[in-house]
Amino acid sequence: MSRINTLLRKDNISIITCYDATFSSLLERCKCDAVLVGDSLGVVIKGDKNTRKVSIDEMIYHTRAVRLGSSCLPIISDMPLLALGTKNNALLNAKALIDAGADMIKIEGGSSVLPIIKFLSDNKIKVCAHIGYTPQSMTAPLAKVNQKKSLAIALNLQKNGAQMIVLSMMGSVTDKLITKNLNIPTIAFRSSSLCRGNVEIIYDLIGITSKFL
């Protein structure tokens, strides 16, 4: 069974975001379940104000570094905003991340990215969806989450091939509702303990608070 298929079967999934070989090696020794190479590197590594200028080449570079630090951990890599475009362009960039060491690609957004997620899934790329607070398109977390709409979006993402979904800052009620109604793992980011797992940024865990929300 592949690394990512083993991950998808688990509960209480622990995913840590990191960007280099040293930290990924440490996370492997600490028995973390998976590593996320996040486009949050635009803020915490590059010092930008947001994630929107991160390039596919930067994501490839950091994905390769993380893979060199860990031969066993499943790696999920963010698809940066600049790497989406057309479905064919997204597929080429997703394959480049897989070649660099990723096991799964994470894509932010709801209805607008459904065609891309389906296309990647149809082409054997494993995709993690990401809804709620999406820094590629939002400047701040949602003031109020529409639970029914969020559930409908999550179900559509699952239907179109997403095999995991990050629920970012959506709150315990929405987390519980979506987790109860989906068959794929739900991963909370700064949200609640009611998902099947959580993802955190390593700099936050060691007390170096990032500017990324």
Image: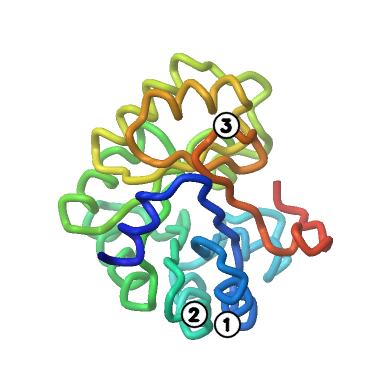
Q: Does 11 sit above or below residue 19?
A: above
- Which kind of residue does numbered mark 1 sit on? Ala
> Could you tell me if the residues under marks 3 and 2 are in contact, i.e. CB atoms within 8 Å?
no
- Which kind of residue does numbered mark 2 sit on? Ser
Where is residue 96? Give x, y as percent.
32, 73
Q: Based on the displayed image, in which of its 4 quarters is residue 32 positioned? A: bottom right
The residue that appears at 64% across and 19% down in the rendered structure is 144
Nearest the eye: 143 or 6: 6
Nearer to us: label 2 or label 1:
2
For label 3, the crowd category at 10 Å Cα-Cα, with few meaning under 14, some 14 to 19 and many 20 or more, is many
Q: Which residue is denoted by mark 1 in the rendering?
A: 21
Where is residue 133? Give x, y as percent.
59, 37
> Could you tell me if the residues under marks 2 and 1 are in contact, i.e. CB atoms within 8 Å?
yes
Name which of mark 3 and mark 1 comes first in the sequence.
1
The CA span between labels 2 and 1 is 7 Å
Q: Which residue is denoted by mark 2 in the rendering?
A: 70
The residue that appears at 25% across and 65% down in the rendered structure is 1
Secondary structure under the numbered disc 2 in the rendered image = loop
Name which of mark 2 and mark 1 comes first in the sequence.
1
